[in-house]
Image (spheres, rainbow, N blue to C red):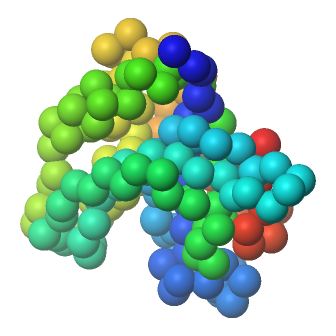
Amino acid sequence: MSPCRMYVTQYARNGDATTELPAHLPRRWELCIQTQRRTTNGSKSRGTTFKITGAFGGPWGYKCEVNREYANDRAWAGSVYVGTVEDADVPRIDQLLRTVALKNGYPSWHSHDWVWAGLLLLRESNYRLELPATFHAMQAKMQAVRDEKWQVGSDSD
Protein backbone atom coordinates (compact mmCIF):
# COMPACT_ATOMS: atom_id res chain seq x y z
CA MET A 1 0.00 0.00 0.00
CA SER A 2 1.12 3.49 -0.77
CA PRO A 3 -0.17 6.75 0.71
CA CYS A 4 -1.73 9.20 -1.74
CA ARG A 5 -2.67 12.83 -1.21
CA MET A 6 -6.34 13.78 -1.56
CA TYR A 7 -7.42 17.19 -2.84
CA VAL A 8 -10.49 19.21 -3.61
CA THR A 9 -9.71 20.55 -7.09
CA GLN A 10 -11.48 23.33 -8.92
CA TYR A 11 -12.03 24.12 -12.57
CA ALA A 12 -13.24 27.18 -14.45
CA ARG A 13 -16.70 26.65 -15.86
CA ASN A 14 -15.77 28.38 -19.12
CA GLY A 15 -13.02 25.79 -19.75
CA ASP A 16 -10.04 28.15 -19.39
CA ALA A 17 -8.93 29.46 -16.00
CA THR A 18 -6.70 32.09 -17.65
CA THR A 19 -9.64 33.82 -19.35
CA GLU A 20 -12.29 33.33 -16.69
CA LEU A 21 -13.81 36.55 -15.40
CA PRO A 22 -13.14 37.09 -11.66
CA ALA A 23 -16.85 37.26 -10.88
CA HIS A 24 -17.69 34.04 -12.77
CA LEU A 25 -18.74 31.82 -9.89
CA PRO A 26 -18.96 29.14 -8.82
CA ARG A 27 -16.10 27.08 -10.13
CA ARG A 28 -16.68 23.34 -10.53
CA TRP A 29 -15.26 21.23 -7.69
CA GLU A 30 -14.03 17.63 -7.84
CA LEU A 31 -12.27 15.24 -5.49
CA CYS A 32 -8.88 13.93 -6.58
CA ILE A 33 -6.57 11.28 -5.19
CA GLN A 34 -3.10 12.01 -6.55
CA THR A 35 -1.40 8.79 -7.68
CA GLN A 36 1.54 10.39 -9.51
CA ARG A 37 3.12 13.73 -8.70
CA ARG A 38 4.49 16.14 -11.29
CA THR A 39 8.25 15.76 -11.72
CA THR A 40 11.04 17.84 -13.21
CA ASN A 41 11.37 15.39 -16.13
CA GLY A 42 8.03 16.54 -17.48
CA SER A 43 5.61 13.96 -16.15
CA LYS A 44 2.31 15.46 -15.06
CA SER A 45 0.31 15.02 -11.89
CA ARG A 46 -2.11 12.15 -12.33
CA GLY A 47 -4.83 10.82 -10.17
CA THR A 48 -8.26 9.34 -9.79
CA THR A 49 -10.92 12.04 -9.90
CA PHE A 50 -14.47 11.85 -8.61
CA LYS A 51 -17.08 14.34 -9.81
CA ILE A 52 -20.64 14.98 -10.74
CA THR A 53 -21.63 15.90 -14.27
CA GLY A 54 -24.61 17.92 -15.38
CA ALA A 55 -25.92 21.43 -14.94
CA PHE A 56 -27.55 23.54 -12.24
CA GLY A 57 -30.92 22.02 -11.43
CA GLY A 58 -29.88 18.63 -12.84
CA PRO A 59 -30.03 16.03 -14.05
CA TRP A 60 -26.77 15.10 -12.34
CA GLY A 61 -24.60 12.03 -12.86
CA TYR A 62 -21.53 10.61 -11.13
CA LYS A 63 -18.19 10.01 -12.85
CA CYS A 64 -14.89 8.50 -11.69
CA GLU A 65 -11.83 8.92 -13.94
CA VAL A 66 -8.68 6.86 -13.33
CA ASN A 67 -5.15 8.05 -14.23
CA ARG A 68 -6.31 11.53 -15.27
CA GLU A 69 -3.85 14.40 -15.76
CA TYR A 70 -6.02 16.52 -13.52
CA ALA A 71 -3.72 19.56 -13.32
CA ASN A 72 -3.00 19.64 -17.06
CA ASP A 73 -6.48 20.82 -17.94
CA ARG A 74 -6.69 24.50 -19.03
CA ALA A 75 -9.74 24.83 -16.80
CA TRP A 76 -7.78 23.68 -13.71
CA ALA A 77 -7.54 26.46 -11.13
CA GLY A 78 -5.81 24.93 -8.13
CA SER A 79 -6.41 22.44 -5.37
CA VAL A 80 -6.72 22.28 -1.59
CA TYR A 81 -5.17 19.36 0.30
CA VAL A 82 -7.67 17.52 2.52
CA GLY A 83 -5.81 14.40 3.65
CA THR A 84 -3.98 11.21 2.77
CA VAL A 85 -5.50 7.85 1.82
CA GLU A 86 -4.00 4.53 0.76
CA ASP A 87 -3.97 3.77 -2.96
CA ALA A 88 -5.62 0.42 -2.21
CA ASP A 89 -8.63 2.35 -0.81
CA VAL A 90 -9.49 4.03 -4.13
CA PRO A 91 -12.09 1.38 -5.16
CA ARG A 92 -13.79 1.61 -1.75
CA ILE A 93 -13.80 5.42 -1.90
CA ASP A 94 -15.38 5.20 -5.37
CA GLN A 95 -18.09 2.90 -3.96
CA LEU A 96 -18.79 5.30 -1.09
CA LEU A 97 -18.94 8.40 -3.29
CA ARG A 98 -21.40 6.68 -5.62
CA THR A 99 -23.83 6.66 -2.67
CA VAL A 100 -23.82 10.45 -2.19
CA ALA A 101 -27.29 11.66 -3.13
CA LEU A 102 -27.62 13.75 -6.30
CA LYS A 103 -30.18 16.53 -5.84
CA ASN A 104 -31.87 16.87 -9.20
CA GLY A 105 -34.39 19.69 -9.45
CA TYR A 106 -32.67 22.01 -6.95
CA PRO A 107 -31.21 24.96 -8.91
CA SER A 108 -28.94 26.06 -6.05
CA TRP A 109 -27.39 22.59 -5.52
CA HIS A 110 -24.15 21.85 -7.41
CA SER A 111 -20.67 20.31 -7.25
CA HIS A 112 -19.64 22.17 -4.07
CA ASP A 113 -22.51 20.57 -2.17
CA TRP A 114 -21.71 17.12 -3.56
CA VAL A 115 -17.99 17.38 -2.76
CA TRP A 116 -18.69 18.53 0.81
CA ALA A 117 -21.20 15.70 1.35
CA GLY A 118 -18.63 13.25 -0.05
CA LEU A 119 -15.90 14.53 2.27
CA LEU A 120 -18.18 14.20 5.29
CA LEU A 121 -19.12 10.65 4.25
CA LEU A 122 -15.46 9.69 3.88
CA ARG A 123 -14.66 11.14 7.30
CA GLU A 124 -17.62 9.23 8.82
CA SER A 125 -16.19 6.11 7.14
CA ASN A 126 -12.96 6.55 9.14
CA TYR A 127 -10.79 8.18 6.48
CA ARG A 128 -8.54 10.68 8.23
CA LEU A 129 -9.27 13.90 6.43
CA GLU A 130 -8.18 17.39 7.45
CA LEU A 131 -11.37 19.32 6.78
CA PRO A 132 -12.34 22.84 7.73
CA ALA A 133 -15.03 23.02 10.41
CA THR A 134 -17.81 24.09 8.03
CA PHE A 135 -18.86 24.08 4.40
CA HIS A 136 -18.47 27.88 4.34
CA ALA A 137 -14.88 27.55 5.62
CA MET A 138 -14.16 25.09 2.77
CA GLN A 139 -15.61 27.57 0.30
CA ALA A 140 -13.33 30.27 1.76
CA LYS A 141 -10.27 28.01 1.31
CA MET A 142 -11.22 27.36 -2.29
CA GLN A 143 -11.79 31.09 -2.85
CA ALA A 144 -8.31 31.80 -1.46
CA VAL A 145 -6.86 29.36 -4.02
CA ARG A 146 -8.84 31.13 -6.71
CA ASP A 147 -7.53 34.52 -5.59
CA GLU A 148 -3.93 33.31 -5.91
CA LYS A 149 -4.53 33.16 -9.68
CA TRP A 150 -3.02 29.70 -10.26
CA GLN A 151 -0.99 29.18 -13.39
CA VAL A 152 -2.71 26.62 -15.58
CA GLY A 153 -0.84 23.32 -15.47
CA SER A 154 1.18 23.98 -12.32
CA ASP A 155 0.63 21.84 -9.25
CA SER A 156 -0.80 22.81 -5.87
CA ASP A 157 1.70 21.07 -3.66
Residue 116 sits above or below residue 64 on the image: above
Figure disc tally: 0
x, y percentage for residue 122?
36, 24
Image quadrant where residue 149 sits: bottom right
- Asked if residue 133 is positioned above or below residue 98 in the image, the reply reads above
Residue at image position (56%, 59%) is 70
Q: Position of residue 38 (x, y in %)?
A: 75, 51
- Pick out the residue farthest to the right: 40
Q: Toward the viewer: 62 or 110? A: 62
Q: Which image quadrant is residue 24 in?
A: bottom right
Quarter of the image for residue 77 reads bottom right
The residue depicted at 59 percent of the width and 51 percent of the height is: 46
**In this rendering, would 53 be left or right of 85?**
left
Q: Image point 15% across, 43% down: which residue?
A: 101
Task: Identify the residue shown where x is 16% and y is 36%.
Answer: 99
User: Going by the image, does 22 lie left or right of 128?
Assistant: right
**65 sits to left or right of 108:** right
Q: Compare residues 20 and 90 and report the one nearer the observer.
A: 90
